[in-house]
Image (cartoon, helix red, strand yellow):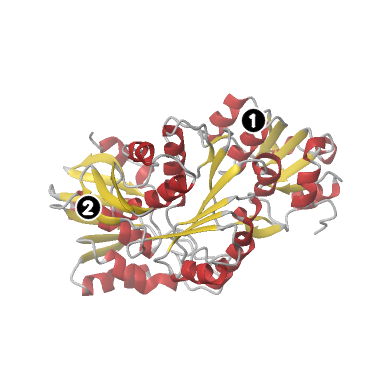
């Protein structure tokens, strides 16, 4: 590995006015594509390459006019025409192409560094970080700012109907700030390179077991950014978040700190969830402010609360913020009602962590009070495929009435981790008095769904991929509105 031409964040910021042409290598990544568009919108000439181009990312990139190439067209001489190469995280440090990029003599960096240096440095960036709720909260913040007549920039990690995944905007910029690493040469969390001015921490638990050995290493990533931001809004229900709060609160008199949560002074208080929304109140400057919103479930009220605190701290009028919060949309695959199957309401959700499963289940029960919940869980992330949360998954899933484990054939890539025992998980859920079954094939999954189905039920599908191909099968066409 030769990092001679890896350009530092400081140097890239200093030289950003000299840079004209930027090339994104593996441009179709979930973060790379939106970042490339933002860099183009910021006034740079942007081009990119990838091995294949598929919708929706290919369609999104084509509408922006970014020239696209196949990887076999990219040679060292080809790359030498650019002022900066942005290398996707899918490029391995052991790959031959990494050596090719390093030897071109062209400065190179990761997309979080390019984004922070070329686009976000002069923005009022609101980073939304945490183990759970990042995507939803970023989308809430974007919608709220729009309803307050701002023109916010944003980069949101989920699929949103009728909206591009990124936008340059004006003063404010809301960005999903995940803790996953940035590139083979930037083994640090993406949010450390985003030039954050404000930080919302929705939650902090152990996850990403393929790159972090423990939660303390994730805490260390936040230690890099906390001293640099002006406003910090933490969910106090998480011990790791409070550990950081106690470590840094009061050290910098120019920082504004806020805690929120069920037991915090601010709240949310008096939370009530109905089928079509929630009501709650916040304590602010000596008064109780009532809110009525379309968001459903305690955890979404908490996500919304973090945004409201930021907006109130920025000086937006209370009545304007109340109005803005009243009607908000959700990201796809977050408690998304997909239709009905055999008279069961079918809900698609991204939850793949024990806590996320619990809060999602709570929200579904609050919304559909008189229905039984049949849960399909596909443990597919590196952490979920490991035995790390074997007992926690048992306890969270046992709050469902019936459970189907959609077992992955992939072994975990968790550091020093063993594979989740999905068959044991189903047996232990049964010992808690709930029907449970483990399947590993789509046909068996369909049979289990039919076996467990009932008209007074909700079918909750928890997966961050296709759930053994369920969402790519005829099951989708059989759903009724």
Residue 147, image x and y in percent? 41, 33
Q: Residues within 10 Å of mark 1 (few under 14, many from 20)?
A: some
- So how many labels did they put on this image? 2
Task: Name the one closer to the observer, 235 or 65.
Answer: 235
Question: In front of the other: label 2 or label 1?
Answer: 2
Disc 1 is placed on an element classified as: helix
Determine if residue 177 is in view. Answer: yes
Write down the residue under mark 2: 272
Residue 11, image x and y in percent? 80, 49
Q: 444 above or below 139?
A: below
Task: Name the one closer to the observer, 308 or 4.
Answer: 308
Q: 191 above or below 237?
A: above
Residue 197, image x and y in percent? 60, 50
Disc 2 is placed on an element classified as: strand
The quarter of the rendered structure image containing the C terminus is top left
The quarter of the rendered structure image containing the N terminus is bottom right
Task: Name the one closer to the observer, 447 or 122.
Answer: 122
Q: Residues within 10 Å of mark 2 (few under 14, many from 20)?
A: some
Write down the residue under mark 1: 41
């Amino acid at each position: 590995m030769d990092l001679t031409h890896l350009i530092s964040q400081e140097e890239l910021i200093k030289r950003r006015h000299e840079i004209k042409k930027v090339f994104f290598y593996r441009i179709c990544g979930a973060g790379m594509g939106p970042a490339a568009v933002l860099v183009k919108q910021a006034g740079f000439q942007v081009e990119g390459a990838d091995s294949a181009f598929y919708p929706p990312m290919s369609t999104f990139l084509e509408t922006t006019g970014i020239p696209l190439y196949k990887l076999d067209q990219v040679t060292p001489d080809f790359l030498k025409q650019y002022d900066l190469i942005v290398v996707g995280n899918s490029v391995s440090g052991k790959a031959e192409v990494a050596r090719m990029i390093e030897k071109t003599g062209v400065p190179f960096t990761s997309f979080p560094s390019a984004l922070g240096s070329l686009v976000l440095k002069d923005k009022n960036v609101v980073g939304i970080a945490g183990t759970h709720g990042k995507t939803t909260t970023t989308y809430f913040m974007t919608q709220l700012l729009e309803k307050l007549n701002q023109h916010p920039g944003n980069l949101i990690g989920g699929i949103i109907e009728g909206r591009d995944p990124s936008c340059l905007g004006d003063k404010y910029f809301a960005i999903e700030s995940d803790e996953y690493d940035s590139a083979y040469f930037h083994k640090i969390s993406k949010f450390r390179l985003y030039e954050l001015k404000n930080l919302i921490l929705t939650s902090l638990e152990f996850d990403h077991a393929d790159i972090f050995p423990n939660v303390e290493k994730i805490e260390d990533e936040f230690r890099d950014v906390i001293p640099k931001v002006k406003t910090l809004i933490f969910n106090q229900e998480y011990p790791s978040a409070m550990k950081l709060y106690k470590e840094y609160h009061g050290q910098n008199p120019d920082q504004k700190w806020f805690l929120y949560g069920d037991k915090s002074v601010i709240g949310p208080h008096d939370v009530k969830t109905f089928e079509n929304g929630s009501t709650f109140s916040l304590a602010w400057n000596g008064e109780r402010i009532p809110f009525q919103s379309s968001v459903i479930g305690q955890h979404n009220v908490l996500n919304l609360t973090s945004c409201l605190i930021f907006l109130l701290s920025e000086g937006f009028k209370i009545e304007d913020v109340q109005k803005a919060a009243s009607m908000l949309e959700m990201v796809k695959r977050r408690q998304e009602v997909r239709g009905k199957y055999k008279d069961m309401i079918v809900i698609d959700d991204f939850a793949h962590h024990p806590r996320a499963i619990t809060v999602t289940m709570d929200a579904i029960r609050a919304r559909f009070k008189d229905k039984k919940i049949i849960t399909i869980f596909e443990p597919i992330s590196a952490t979920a495929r490991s035995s790390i949360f074997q007992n926690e998954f048992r306890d969270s899933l046992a709050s469902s009435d019936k459970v189907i484990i959609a077992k992955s054939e992939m072994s975990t890539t968790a550091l020093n981790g063993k594979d989740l025992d999905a068959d044991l998980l189903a047996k232990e859920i049964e010992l808690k008095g709930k029907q449970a079954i483990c399947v590993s094939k789509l046909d068996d999954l369909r049979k289990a769904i039919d076996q467990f189905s009932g008209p007074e039920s909700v079918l909750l599908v928890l997966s961050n991929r296709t759930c053994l191909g369920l969402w790519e099968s005829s099951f989708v066409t059989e759903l009724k509105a």
